[in-house]
Amino acid sequence: MGRYKRYYVRMGFGRPILSGRHLLQLRQVNLQYISDRSFKSPDEFILKYGWCVFTCDGRAEEQLGSPAYVHPGWDGWMASNHVMRAIPRQGVQPGYLYLALRSPYTQRQLKARATGSVVDALEPETIGEVLLPALSSRDQERLGKASARAWDDIASAQELEDRTVQDFEKLIIAGYEEAK
């Protein structure tokens, strides 16, 4: 994906862009919005529902390789070049891929493949050798659907909370206006 010039913009004038640190935050702190003109090929940075993403730069003893699932709330957002994408192959339940990446067995393999001296990094060529836990097709399907449903529920809860806060703020403003 390479480096790109960042044209950050206000909300509504660009897409939200996730960094590696954002992946494990329930609410993204200091989320930036970026213009598509920052990229030669913006589509390479756009996330799709059902993908898995994980940090590919950082410290192996910290969050390097920690996965997240692209839920409906993140669909169409972008992720920086410090975030690796794991796109499920045909026939692989997306939620299962997330669980497999989160497995301690997979995490140990990812962290063992990190290179670098000050900042560890994962490269696509080396992580392709990582072996994922094998379960029966039936278990992959069952657990994968449960995992995807949990992430979808997180997105729904965030959306509901946002609407409730907006309603609350409208009532506060209305009460303030009446009191004038």
Image (tube, helix red, strand yellow):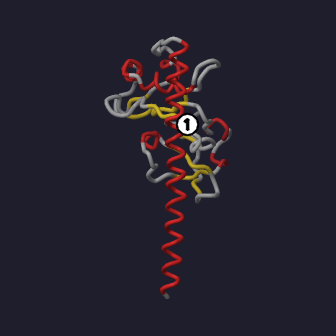
Q: Residue at x 31, y 30 (%)?
A: 61
Q: Is residue 158 above or below residue 109?
A: below
Residue drawn 57% across the image and 54% down it: 8
In the rendered image, which quarter is residue 55 located in? top left
Q: Position of residue 64 (x, y in %)?
A: 40, 31
Q: Say which residue label 1 marks.
A: 70
Q: Amino acid at mark 1?
A: Val
Task: Depth check: give the residue in front, 97 or 29.
Answer: 97
Image vertical order of residue 146 relative to residue 160, above or below: above
Residue 108 vertical position relative to residue 179 in the rendered view, above or below: above
Along the viewing direction, whichever of 142 and 48 lies nearer the viewer = 142
On the image, the x and y values in percent for residue 75 come to: 61, 41
Name the residue rendered at 48%, 12% in the picture: 134
* 101 lies left or right of 11: left
Tell me where residue 135 appears, x and y as whole percent.
Answer: 48, 13
Residue 85 or 168: which is nearer the viewer?
Answer: 168
In this view, which residue lies farthest toward the bottom? 180
Which residue does the image show at 57% across and 43% down from the upper left? 74
| Classed neighbour count for the residue bearing mark 1: other residues with Cα under 10 Å, few (<14), some (14–19), many (≥20) | many
| Residue closest to the eye, 149 or 81 | 149
Q: What element does badge 1 sit on?
A: loop
Instruction: Name, please, the residue furthest toward the left.
Output: 61
Labels in figure, total: 1
Quarter that holds the N terminus: top right
